[in-house]
Image (tube, coloured by chain):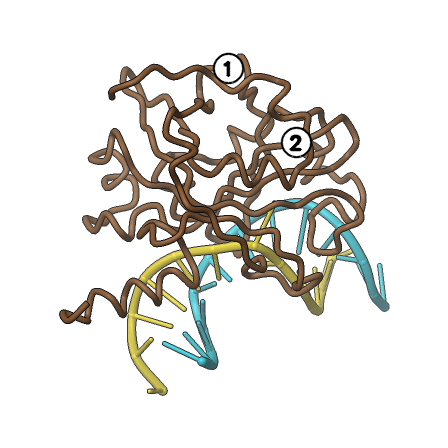
Chain colours: A brown, B yellow, C cyan
DNA sequence: CTTTAGATCGGCT
DNA sequence: GCCGATCTAAAGC
């Protein structure tokens, strides 16, 4: 990996959740795996800015499930859903704000063999292009709920020198049934590791030789 | 105690 | 494009 990277600091996580969601796109997420480190570039995020957002898990107030999201920014919120999948969020803002950013898509950079083994797939474009897929590939489960992203070594985030190069688009959030109109999803335009709508687009492209 | 809905994924009517 | 799998936390009774 060329270039030097430094870990995102606390100040990064104590700003507005929308800005954090936007700026996490292009950053590097790292997961300790034995004596190796899985690495990927975040290519898609969604903001869940707090308790007044009906789509947020924190809308109903603090519960056992969502309590880590009410902590001060800089830790993980990992939840289990649909009987199958874990999803990974970065908690943002001051204590009791109940805000965070869902990581929805990652471009694999390092440890790809381990990710493929975890997911039992060989197609790199089907490895981390969705919140459940990314969590599975990176070995993220409830043991990482409330993990310290600032000082811990199990999972952490790094600055990237290339953040600025990427073209970022925003859209409505995916997979929610309430408060669906807000443009709280951010992703890199034309990146093949984006989930959801991106998936259909790239499928089409792959079948179209004339492009 | 029982029911229900869910920040998803993968397979196929 | 649509639907079922599969489990958990929360809400209903």
Q: Position of residue A16 (x, y in %)?
A: 69, 35
The answer to whether A141 is drawn above or below residue A204 in the figure is: above
Residue at 23 percent across and 35 percent down: it is: A112
Q: Position of residue A178 (x, y in %)?
A: 70, 63
Q: Badge 2 local density, few (<14 within 10 Å), some, or many (20+)? A: many
Q: Quadrant of residue C1?
A: bottom left
Is A103 or A1 nearer to us in this picture?
A: A1
The answer to whether A53 is drawn above or below residue A139 in the figure is: below
The quarter of the rendered structure image containing the N terminus of chain A is top left
- Parent chain of label 1: A
Residue occupied by mark 1: A152
Q: Badge 1 local density, few (<14 within 10 Å), some, or many (20+)? A: few
* Closer to viewer: mark 2 or mark 1: 2
Q: Secondary structure at mark 2?
A: strand
Q: Position of C6 compared to A51: left or right?
A: left
Residue at 26 percent across and 51 percent down: it is: A125
The quarter of the rendered structure image containing the C terminus of chain A is bottom left
- Parent chain of label 2: A
The reply to whether the C-beta atoms of the residues labelled 2 and 1 are less than 8 Å apart is no
Is A66 or A183 nearer to us in this picture?
A: A183
Residue at mark 2 to residue at mark 1: CA–CA distance: 17 Å
Is A148 or A194 nearer to us in this picture?
A: A194
Q: Position of residue A64 (x, y in %)?
A: 72, 37
Q: Residue most toward the left?
A: A209
Q: Position of A55 compared to A142: left or right?
A: right
| Sequence-wise first label, 2 or 1 | 2
The answer to whether A70 is drawn above or below residue A192 in the figure is: above
Residue at 50 percent across and 15 percent down: it is: A152
Residue occupied by mark 2: A92
Q: Position of residue A11 (x, y in %)?
A: 64, 19
């Amino acid at each position: 990996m060329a270039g030097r990277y430094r870990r995102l600091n606390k100040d990064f996580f104590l700003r507005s959740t929308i800005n954090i969601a936007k700026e996490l796109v292009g950053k590097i997420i790292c997961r300790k795996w034995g004596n190796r480190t899985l690495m990927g570039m975040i290519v898609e995020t969604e903001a869940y800015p707090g308790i007044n957002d009906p789509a947020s898990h924190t809308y109903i107030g603090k519960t056992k499930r969502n309590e880590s999201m009410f902590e001060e920014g800089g830790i993980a919120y990992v939840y289990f859903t649909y009987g199958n999948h874990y999803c990974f969020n970065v908690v943002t803002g001051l204590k009791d704000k109940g805000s965070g950013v869902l990581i929805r898509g990652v471009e694999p950079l390092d440890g790809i063999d381990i990710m493929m083994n975890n997911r039992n797939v060989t197609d790199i474009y089907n490895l981390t292009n969705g919140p459940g897929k990314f969590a599975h590939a990176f070995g993220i489960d409830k043991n990482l709920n409330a993990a310290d992203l600032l000082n811990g070594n199990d999972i952490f985030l790094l600055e990237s020198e290339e953040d600025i190069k990427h073209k970022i688009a925003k859209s409505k959030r995916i997979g929610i049934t309430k408060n669906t109109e807000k443009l709280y999803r951010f992703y890199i335009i034309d990146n093949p590791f984006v989930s959801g709508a991106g998936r259909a687009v790239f499928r089409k492209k792959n079948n179209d030789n004339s492009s």
